[in-house]
Image (spheres, rainbow, N blue to C red):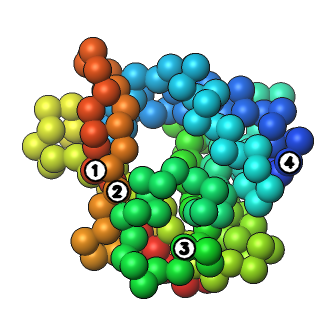
Amino acid sequence: MADLRVERLRGAALAEVLGDVARLRIRVFRDWPYLYDGDEAYEADYLKAYTRPGAVCVAVWDGQQMVGASTGAPLTQHAEDFASALPPSWPLEQTFYCAESVLLPAYRGRGLGHVFFDEREAQARDLALSRSVFASVLRASDHPQRPDKYRPLDPFWRARGYAPLESCVARFSWKDLGDDVETLKPLQMWGRAL
């Protein structure tokens, strides 16, 4: 990783790179399991949430090119779809939402997944938040576009102390590659105490 630069960006510095984050999201999320047919207008609107206080973007640079990014924000500032999937007893005001992580394939396997979680969890602690959650896309195991060599990230997430939250499934819409309209997708919520 000596050739890469990692930055935890907030505020104006984060706002300056949202176009880079949008392009990475569109590129990386075309792959399994998202199969996302990205749209720059949607991305610009969605990423506005990260201009609010408390939000963070962990950016990975190779020279001047952003090759990875991971976003997060207090859950109370993010889409209601995720908060409403949590149990009534879950302390929303104490929860940080670890949103998406995107990394170009050539940069995977270098420990950046840990860096993404370390930095977002540090942001949560800086905000005095005591819980962390994220959502993972649920797709059928026999889905025709599932790659033969696909390895779920569940073991990695569990090693980080996260566990699926029982019966906590969020619903979020996007357009899959090859589709004409958006469809609702289930996303399993995972969480842990910090």
Q: Nearer the viewer, residue 52 or 104?
A: 52
Please name the residue shown 47% across and 23% down the image: 38
Above or below for 101 versus 22: below
Image quarter of residue 125: bottom right
Q: Determine the CA span between mark 3 and mark 2.
A: 15 Å
CA neighbours of label 1 inside 10 A, class few (<14), some (14 to 19), many (20+)? some
Q: Determine the CA span between mark 3 and mark 4.
A: 22 Å
CA neighbours of label 2 inside 10 A, class few (<14), some (14 to 19), many (20+)? many
**Residue 21 can be seen in this image:** yes
User: Which quarter shows the C terminus?
Assistant: bottom right
Q: Secondary structure at mark 3?
A: helix
Image quarter of residue 106: top right
Query: Mark 4 highlights which residue?
Result: 11
Residue 170 numbered mark, or none:
2
Sequence-first disc among 4 and 1 = 4
Q: Determine the CA span between mark 2 and mark 1.
A: 6 Å
Query: Mark 1 highlights which residue?
Result: 186
Q: Nearer the viewer, mark 3 or mark 4?
A: 3
CA neighbours of label 4 inside 10 A, class few (<14), some (14 to 19), many (20+)? some
Sequence-first disc among 3 and 2 = 3
Q: Residue furthest left?
A: 142
Q: Are marks 2 and 1 in contact (CB under 8 Å)?
A: yes
Please name the residue shown 75% across and 67% down the image: 123
Q: Nearer the viewer, mark 3 or mark 2?
A: 3
Residue 63 in the image: x percent, y percent? 83, 32
Q: Tag 4: residue type? A: Gly
- For residue 161, side relative to residue 131 (left or right): left
Query: Mark 3 highlights which residue?
Result: 92
